[in-house]
Image (cartoon, rainbow, N blue to C red):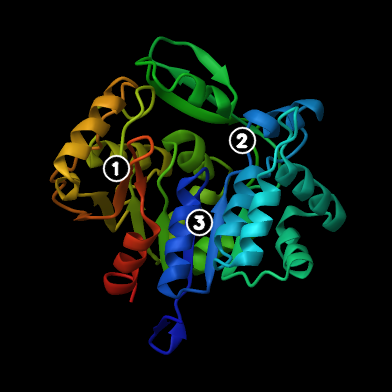
Amino acid sequence: MIVYNDVMKRVCTIGGGSGMPVVNQALVRAGFDNIHSIVTTFDSGGHSGRLRTDERGNLLAFSDYWRALMSLWQNGDQKKLWEEMLQFRDGRKRNFGNTFFLFMAEKTGNLSQVDNLFKNLAGAELKGKVIPVSLQPSNICFQTQSGQEYCGEHLLDDYRMSYDKVEKVWLEPKVKANPEATDAVKKAEVIIICPGSLYGSVIANFLPEDFAEAYNQTEAKKILVTNLMSTANSTHDYSQLDYINVFTEYLSTQNPFDEIIMQDFNRFNQDNLKKALDLYKLENSFPIKPADNGQIKTLIEDIAVIEKSNYRFRHSQEKLAKLFKNNFLI
């Protein structure tokens, strides 16, 4: 248990995709148990997309929600079994986790109440709760430099290797933020914006009405964990300054963060690093670059690993946990 001035520190994470679960697990490893995770509900890919299409779009996406929920559960045999069940896909690629959480959302009448039902069913000891950024269904739409317009979060992934970069992103229809999400942001002591698809998993959280305003009003310490590598259609040739500029635009503030955390690529084994970078180059993907911004503190740390099976970079739960525990959160 991490204590701050004799009171449990309230941490809020914002994101979605695969980045938020890593940050949440790092926080749990570091001893935090008052974590509020705000997640997107606009996914339109894979089984989530098929479910939403069947309902004419009148359905929230559950995938980011249940992945974040599982990340707040400390590792153990029971958790491992539930993860295997939730990740199961049948012969038609239907995901059990999405169907199961659809059932629980209908049972409780509100996705915000699902975590309590899940704790009772699974006996899970969650170190916080997951909060949908909006309780109204919507879709991520975007316009590229060439003037093309697309609607659907999955298309951001489908065109990720294209140099026709995203210029503008919005929601259709417009929706309001979940009041529980804005309240969590306002009451937080520390906010961590997690790595992930810049527009699909991160900026999407700030698009519902009232959420960016709540973020700007909070007195919490605001920390951005950048991606390790760029994607051609969203962050090609990006430095931390470009991240700042994007958030400045969508949040309508000149001070979107207090600190930025980036990977120190010099800490990798250089032979493994070269092999990984050569493979990423084939995907039009390159390291996010540090830059002297003169106003926002930047921590360039050893927070990632290279997976030997496919030579991909991944944020490390263990390394992030050490950083969170020994540096700025306590």
Q: Name the kind of residue labelled 1 in the image.
A: Ile
Q: Name the kind of residue labelled 2 in the image.
A: Asp
Give the percent coordinates (x, y) of residue 194.
Answer: 42, 50
Task: Decide which of tag 2 and tag 3 comes sooner along the chain.
Answer: 2
Instruction: Please report the residue visible at 84 percent of the width from the left and 54 percent of the height from the top.
Output: 109
Mark 1, residues whose alpha carbon is within 10 Å: few (<14), some, or many (≥20)? Answer: some
**Residue farthest to the bottom, as pictured:** 6
Give the label, 3 or 1, closer to the camera.
1
Asked if disc 3 and disc 1 are in contact, CB closer than 8 Å, the reply is no
Give the percent coordinates (x, y) of residue 289.
Answer: 20, 38
Instruction: Please report the residue visible at 21 percent of the width from the left and 54 percent of the height from the top.
Output: 296
Q: Which residue is mark 1?
A: 244
Vertically, is 246 above or below 109? Answer: above
Q: Which residue is mark 2?
A: 43
Q: Which mark is residue 110?
A: none
The residue nearer to you, when weighing 206 against 32, is 32
Q: CA distance from mark 3 to mark 1?
A: 18 Å
Q: CA distance from mark 2 to mark 1?
A: 24 Å
* Residue 19 appears anywhere in the view: yes
Give the percent coordinates (x, y) of residue 98.
Answer: 72, 43
Give the percent coordinates (x, y) of residue 184.
Answer: 55, 64
Mark 3, residues whose alpha carbon is within 10 Å: few (<14), some, or many (≥20)? Answer: some
Q: Name the kind of residue labelled 3 in the image.
A: Ala
Answer left or right for 25 relative to 222: right
Q: Which mark is residue 214?
A: 3
Query: Quick one: SS at disc 2?
Result: loop
Q: CA distance from mark 2 to mark 3?
A: 23 Å
